[in-house]
Image (cartoon, coloured by chain):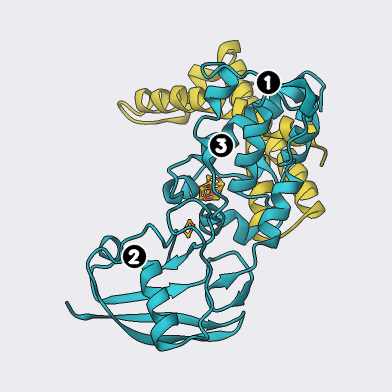
Chain colours: A cyan, B yellow
Amino acid sequence: MTDLRVSVWRGDESGDQEYFDVPRKENQTILDVVTYIQRNLDPTLSYRYACRVGMCGSCAMSVNGVARWTCRTHVDKVCDTDELELRPLDNFPVVKDLVCDMQTFFNKQKKAGGAFQGSKSRDDGLAIIKPDSKGRMAVDKAIECIGCGVCYASCDIIKWNPDYLGPAALNRAWTLVEDERDTRRVDRLRAVSGDAGCHACHTQMSCTQRCPKLLSPTHSISGLKREVTRAALKGEI
Amino acid sequence: MSPQHSAYLWLAQRVTALVLAACVIVHLITMIIAVQGGLTAGEILARTQGSIAWLLFYSVFVVAIVVHAPIGLRNIAREHLRWAKGADIAAVLFGLLLLVLGFRAVWGVFS
Ligand code: SF4
Ligand code: SF4
Ligand code: FES
């Protein structure tokens, strides 16, 4: 197997692509490639990962122009040639090299009412949620979000309107809107409505196409639009 | 814009989109039928003048456009021109312009 010619972003907001030659192996992931560079070629390269098995959501970056989780992306799947271009995720400020600043991304989850607020205490025992209840079924996929930011990096609206809450935050809000234990429904519907909220979404589904967990934030956002409208007509918001 | 107003704008745009879909179909079919054997002003006016049904149809068509188009343009202005308040005012003015021009045309072929 020939070497991979890997170009990697070096710097923060300003910087340049730097080239490395990495031996190609079978079943090699993009994260393996980055780790090889850091361990063998340049220990100053910064990048993020934790679980290596698609659970923590920390390893996402732009791979040949497409946002992906890197621990579960095989080189063979994304590389027809021997060239690989790695950059930090789009739509995020860059801290250094492949590490981006997730603060705004997570703050937007808070802003969209992403914190659960129940009415019971720990002494009340566990709430029983029927697996086939309407609300639980509506969020069956959406609750699997790992907060990787791939959807956020793939959404054009965030480029046009940096205040837009984005697919992950709205998806999170949707899971709580449909959560029968939660008590902040009306506040949350208020928070997600408007030009920086669910109404800004163009339903173009880049987020849904790219989400590595195969979730559909677009579907969640449509659900929010529906619920917000209902609440407005009832005079709740 | 309040959360409630945003929701109403969105709803108004969806509902008028539905109305427009139906109106456009009727409009296209009428056009295809109308151009058979040549298109003349006389033929169009013979169909529409004094016809309450066409008056109502084109009035609904115009109202749907007046509501639908400015909401979309407002969004485009906000996203691509980064207008905020200005976009609201421009959209309302554009809606009024459509209203005047639209009803002028509707009345023109009715009376
Ligand atoms: S919705 Fe998908 S792409 Fe977006 S943060 Fe969650 S897991 Fe990642
Ligand atoms: S569907 Fe909506 S949230 Fe998803 S990428 Fe498109 S505009 Fe962004
Ligand atoms: S390292 Fe945890 S998801 Fe990739």
Q: Alpha carbon of mark 1 to alpha carbon of mark 3: how far? A: 17 Å
Chain for disc number 3: A
Q: Position of residue B91 (x, y in %)?
A: 73, 45
Identified at 45% across, 88% down, the residue is A42
Give SS at disc 3: helix
Dot 1: element: loop
Q: Nearer the viewer, mark 1 or mark 3?
A: 1
Give the camera-side residue of B46 and A69. Answer: A69
Badge 1 and badge 2 both on one subunit? yes
Which subunit holds the residue at mark 2? A
Spatial CA span between label 1 and label 2 = 41 Å
Q: Secondary structure at mark 2?
A: loop
Q: Nearer the viewer, residue A21 or A83?
A: A21
Instruction: Classify mark 1 as within 8 Å of ligand 1 or not, answering yes or no.
Output: no
**Residue at 62% in and 50% down:** A166
Which three-letter amino acid code belongs to the residue tagged 3? Ile
Where does the C terminus of chain A fall, quadrant-wise? top right
Rate crowding at label 2 as few (under 14), some (14 to 19) or many (20 or more) other CA atoms within 10 Å: many
Q: Earlier in the sequence, mark 1 or mark 3?
A: 1
Q: Which residue is mark 1?
A: A127
Residue furthest to the front in view is A123
Vertical arrangement, residue A16 with respect to residue B108, above or below: below
User: How far across and how far down the image is residue A52, in percent?
Assistant: 44, 59
**Type of amino acid at the residue the image marks with label 1:** Ala
Q: Tell me if A204 is positioned left or right of A28 in this view.
A: right
Tell me whether marks 1 and 3 sit on the same chain. yes
Question: Which residue in the structure is indicated by mark 3?
Answer: A143
Label 2 belongs to which residue? A29
